[in-house]
Image (cartoon, grey):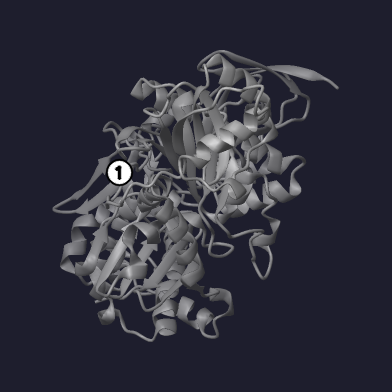
């Protein structure tokens, strides 16, 4: 096998690459963080890199996506460019810290009932008279603390440690208890220190909260982009990768476990504590991320009837999952509801207490795979809407994640205005700005109900006249210019194309159809809904008015919308701090009636109606 030297800048990272391998494959093997929004299928055109030495002829797909000027400058797509000689490749600045990752959450209180307990005990000293074993004497000490002898158990690992720990501590030890199981033994009285971390593992981001398990105090918060994005931006891409790529599942699992361990280190350092003081981890994740974290093949989720391998709550040894915390540590997995409505939705419902609400409420987590729940204490129905990647910026011509350089909001005033994350020159447009831009076009009458951009001479609203210069042509169709090439950070214009609008119509149509199907299933009208709760990053950055104008959310509910932050993270924290709340997640998951949209009799017609815009 022939090999070539590939140097990545900045950082001067040298990699020996096999002849014929793509830059994407080389970057993944080198551990370079980079977003491949379409999973490396060559469809989104977002993995632009600059080959400054060793330039090769672009493939046909690159010629279709990239402009002639870009090709001449050495711009290539990392997923399509094969290595056939030595290369120097310049990567764009993708500092993960510049991504807007939602870590704030809507708080609610709960009684603290740690899932693990530390029990200081004094083990009787051995004697010739009784000849009681170390384990027998330890059991007797725990019985004196109120435990039932018949229920006490432990592991071989603990039994191996026991003689040295007991004698080394002069018989004064602390037993780390999970229910009636001795999960660990420590010398002397170590009761005062017991920490835990609650995680929300999303498709795009991972957020972790370090908590004191006795007081509930939040000691630090950490976050990162989910490193699995190098294998695909959305759930479907990762399902495909896990099932069809050689060692795909192992690669995905290793990536998320390594990310969790890094976040644990970072959180401990920020709080000036030891990771050995961390005894419990809680995990809220969608069903696919849940399965991958456990190393379970998620293939069953991808094919009808879309059933997960497991949906029950779990308590697992952290060491079994290679999570580096205290050796007595446990990982608590919140339960799933269905194939595409996972433990993150359960965590959101736990936070919002929908199962105890007197009023009917609508809970929406908008994303590539949007989860929607509707109900009250009487009943709850839920569904998953395959919104696609438009809200995350993929498949949008100038789309990008909510990171530095992204236009995040658009304003139609005397002239077009916008805000940019981090300030500076814009690099693209993220989902919240896409909603604003299209909502403005709808209100101005620049779009018709089918989403077609009208020519200037077709406009009837005088207010639309101000934006004549923004109406341009792109690939033979109408487009709306947001930023000219001369004022952007990469020298390319940023615009909303006719194809972009169609992508948004499909995404908002799926979400709106999901809401309508749930209302029909429940037997209510929009006016019967007391409150709309928006969870997750996209739901908390969007403008509610824009969402209602385009029909993503029923317009009559605009005044009832409330953002609740990272509610999945809050639910994960609640389950970590309280054994009662953790047990309640099982009841919530079992109480929810899952509605499969694809099987709903009128879904196709409802979806078609929901793709239209309501023009005044």
On-image quarter of the C terminus:
bottom left
Q: Secondary structure at mark 1?
A: loop
Q: Is residue 314 visible?
A: yes
Answer above or below: position of 402 versus 11. below
Q: Quadrant of residue 366?
A: bottom left
On-image quarter of the N terminus:
top right
Residue drawn at x 30%, y 71% is: 357
Q: For this rendering, which residue is in front, 221 or 321?
A: 321
Q: For this rendering, which residue is in front, 439 or 335?
A: 335
Give the image location of residue 324, x and y in percent. Answer: 56, 28
Residue drawn at x 52%, y 35% is: 141
Left or right relative to 432: residue 280: right
Left or right relative to 482: residue 380: right
Q: Quadrant of residue 485?
A: top left
Residue drawn at x 53%, y 21% is: 171
Residue that badge 1 annotates? 104
Residue drawn at x 47%, y 69% is: 510
Give the image location of residue 460, x and y in percent. Answer: 22, 72
Left or right relative to 324: residue 461: left
Q: Quadrant of residue 327?
A: top right
Give the image location of residue 140, x and y in percent. Answer: 55, 37
Answer above or below: position of 370 versus 324. below
How many C-alpha atoms fall within 10 Å of the one at disc 1: few (<14), some, or many (≥20)? some
Q: Residue furthest left?
A: 414
Q: For this rendering, which residue is in front, 468 or 429?
A: 429
Q: Is residue 322 visible?
A: no
Give the image location of residue 287, x and y in percent. Answer: 56, 55
Q: For this rendering, which residue is in front, 263 or 554?
A: 263
Q: Residue furthest right?
A: 1
């Amino acid at each position: 096998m022939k090999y070539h030297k590939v140097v990545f800048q900045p950082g001067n990272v040298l990699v020996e690459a096999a002849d014929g391998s793509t830059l994407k494959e080389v970057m993944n093997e080198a551990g370079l963080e980079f977003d491949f929004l379409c999973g490396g299928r060559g469809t989104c055109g977002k993995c632009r890199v600059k080959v400054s030495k060793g330039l090769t002829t672009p493939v046909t797909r690159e010629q279709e996506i990239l402009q002639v000027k870009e090709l001449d400058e050495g711009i290539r797509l990392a997923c399509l460019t094969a290595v056939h000689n030595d290369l120097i490749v310049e990567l764009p600045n993708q500092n993960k810290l510049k991504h807007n990752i939602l870590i704030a959450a809507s708080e609610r209180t709960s009684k603290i009932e740690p899932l693990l307990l530390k029990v200081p005990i004094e083990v009787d000293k051995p004697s010739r008279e009784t000849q009681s074993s170390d384990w027998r004497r330890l059991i007797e000490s725990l019985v004196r603390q109120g435990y039932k002898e018949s229920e006490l158990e432990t592991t071989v690992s603990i039994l191996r440690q026991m003689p040295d720990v007991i004698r080394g501590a002069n018989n004064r030890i602390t037993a780390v208890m999970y229910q009636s199981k001795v999960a660990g033994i420590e010398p002397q009285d170590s009761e005062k220190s017991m920490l835990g971390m609650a995680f929300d593992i999303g498709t795009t981001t991972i957020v972790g909260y370090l908590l004191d398990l006795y007081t509930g105090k939040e000691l630090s918060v950490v976050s990162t982009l989910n490193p699995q994005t190098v294998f695909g931006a959305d759930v479907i891409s990762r399902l495909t990768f896990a099932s069809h790529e050689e060692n795909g599942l192992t690669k995905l699992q290793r990536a998320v476990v390594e990310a969790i361990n890094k976040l644990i280190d970072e959180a401990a350092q920020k709080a000036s504590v030891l990771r050995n003081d961390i005894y419990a981890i809680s995990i809220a994740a969608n069903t696919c991320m849940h399965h991958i974290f456990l190393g379970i093949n998620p293939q069953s989720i991808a094919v009808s009837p879309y059933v997960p391998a497991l949906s029950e709550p779990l308590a697992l040894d952290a060491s079994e999952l290679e999570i580096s915390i205290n050796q007595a540590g446990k990982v608590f997995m919140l339960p799933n509801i269905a194939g595409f409505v996972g433990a993150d939705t359960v965590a959101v419902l736990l936070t919002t207490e929908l199962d105890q609400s007197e009023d009917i409420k609508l809970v929406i987590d908008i994303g590539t795979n949007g989860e929607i729940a509707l109900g009250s204490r009487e009943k709850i129905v839920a569904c998953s809407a395959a919104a696609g990647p438009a809200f995350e910026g993929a498949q949008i011509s100038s789309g990008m994640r909510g990171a530095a350089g992204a236009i995040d909001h658009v304003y139609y005033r005397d002239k077009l205005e916008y805000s940019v994350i981090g300030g500076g020159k814009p690099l693209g447009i993220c989902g919240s700005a896409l909603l604003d831009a299209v909502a403005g076009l709808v209100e101005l009458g620049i779009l018709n109900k089918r989403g077609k951009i009208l020519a200037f001479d077709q406009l009837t609203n005088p207010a639309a006249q101000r934006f004549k210069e923004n109406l341009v042509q792109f690939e033979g169709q109408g487009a709306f210019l947001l930023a000219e090439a001369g004022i952007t950070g990469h020298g390319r214009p940023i615009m909303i194309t006719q194809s972009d609008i169609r992508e948004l119509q499909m995404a908002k149509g799926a979400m709106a159809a999901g809401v309508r199907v749930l209302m029909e299933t429940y037997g209510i009208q929009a006016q019967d809904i007391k409150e709309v709760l928006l969870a997750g990053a996209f739901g908390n950055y969007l403008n509610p008015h824009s969402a209602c104008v385009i029909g993503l959310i029923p317009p009559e509910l605009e005044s009832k919308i409330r953002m609740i932050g990272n509610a999945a993270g809050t639910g994960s924290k609640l389950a970590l701090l309280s054994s009662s709340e953790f047990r309640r997640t099982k009841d919530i998951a079992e109480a929810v009636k899952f509605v499969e949209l694809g099987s709903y009799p009128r879904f196709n017609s409802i979806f078609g109606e929901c793709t239209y815009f309501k023009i005044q």
